[in-house]
Image: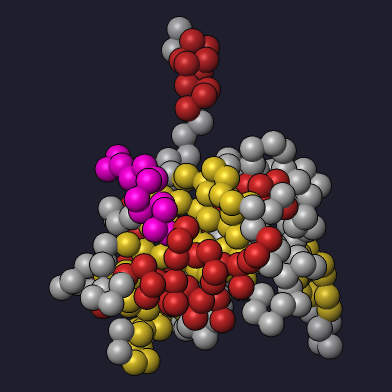
């Protein structure tokens, strides 16, 4: 198996080392793992692509490249340049530093990379490590992802649904904020919504009097309702959420047709 891995935390992020170990385990001794990751941190860029400017691609070592672009750019670079003669069987993105559950999904560059892979017709899985007081101070805060990551990916490859729809399925995995030995299992979950959390800004004036705005997130440990990703993680489970790039609100189509076409 040939696996392309990327992230949004950057080529030197510790979570990428964890993902590389996971990918090597899944690929097996006869497989290949290729890395194309952002040269710098690109957290929160979502599904951005560098449409209006070129990006520098640098080779750091065998099968290891950095792009001065976004995570989705890295996937495109991997598919159409780095691995153009031997395309990947799978794209893995992460392991993100922090959860990509609930509304975070909409902002995440980690998710953006897998979304682009799915649009390109390649199976893709995003992996993120939820942080909290029970794992942030561990010698390896990515321990839970490191221990359970390969098994989770293999389970998805074997038993998950992999379709060939125009907007095909891809998967979002979040590892709970607990030590690896405390994980209770896996839960298939919907994307949740943190009712008391939103992004905002904090203004700050420079010494020259100019105003700068820092983007701030909100609390991450509010449950998001039964059957949802954050709740599963806070209950000690690995959450698996199937995603599609199709943003159509299909549940409203019939009602709108009656109201607007009649």
- Residue 210 horizontal/vertical position (percent): 79, 79
Q: Residue furthest left?
A: 85
Let me know if residue 37 appears in the view.
yes
Q: Magenta stretch containing residue 45, yes or no?
A: no
Q: Is residue 253 above or below residue 43?
A: above
Left/right of residue 76 with respect to residue 39 in the rendered view: left
Give me the residue at 53% from left, 49% from top. 240
Q: Is residue 191 above or below residue 42?
A: above
Q: Point out the image quarter for the C terminus.
A: top left
Left/right of residue 179 with respect to residue 91 in the rendered view: right
Res. 139 image quadrant: bottom right
Q: Residue furthest bottom?
A: 61
Res. 100 image quadrant: bottom right
Give me the residue at 70% from left, 46% from top. 231
- Residue 65 horizontal/vertical position (percent): 36, 84
Give me the residue at 77% from left, 67% from top. 134
Q: Is residue 102 above or below residue 181?
A: above
Let me know if residue 46 appears in the view.
no
Q: Residue furthest front?
A: 181
Nearer to me, 99 or 166 = 99
Give me the residue at 43% from left, 59% from top. 153
Looking at the rendering, the stretch of residues picked out in magenta corresponds to 153-169
- Residue 30 horizontal/vertical position (percent): 23, 75
């Amino acid at each position: 198996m040939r696996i392309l891995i990327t992230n949004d935390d950057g080529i030197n992020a510790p979570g990428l080392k964890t993902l590389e170990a996971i990918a090597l385990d899944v690929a097996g001794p006869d497989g290949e793992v290729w890395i194309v990751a952002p040269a710098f941190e690109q957290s929160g860029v979502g599904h951005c692509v560098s449409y209006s400017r070129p990006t520098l691609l640098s080779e750091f070592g065998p099968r290891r490249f950095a792009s001065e672009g976004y995570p989705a750019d890295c996937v495109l670079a991997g598919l159409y340049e780095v691995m153009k003669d031997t395309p990947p069987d799978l794209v893995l993105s992460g392991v993100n530093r922090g959860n990509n559950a609930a509304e975070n999904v909409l902002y995440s560059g980690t998710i953006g990379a897998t979304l682009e892979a799915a649009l390109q017709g390649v199976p893709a899985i995003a992996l993120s490590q939820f942080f909290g007081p029970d794992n942030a101070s561990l010698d390896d805060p990515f321990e839970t992802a490191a221990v359970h990551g390969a098994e989770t990916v293999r389970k998805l490859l074997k038993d998950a649904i992999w379709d060939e729809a125009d907007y095909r399925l891809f998967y979002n995995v979040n590892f709970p904020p607990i030590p690896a030995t405390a994980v209770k299992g896996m839960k298939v979950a919907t994307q949740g919504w943190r009712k008391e959390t939103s992004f905002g800004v904090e203004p700050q004036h420079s010494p020259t009097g100019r105003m700068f705005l820092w983007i701030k997130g909100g609390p991450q440990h509010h449950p998001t309702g039964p059957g949802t990703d954050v709740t599963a993680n806070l209950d000690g489970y690995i959450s698996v959420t199937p995603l599609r790039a199709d943003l159509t609100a299909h549940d409203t189509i019939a009602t709108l047709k009656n109201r607007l076409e009649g």
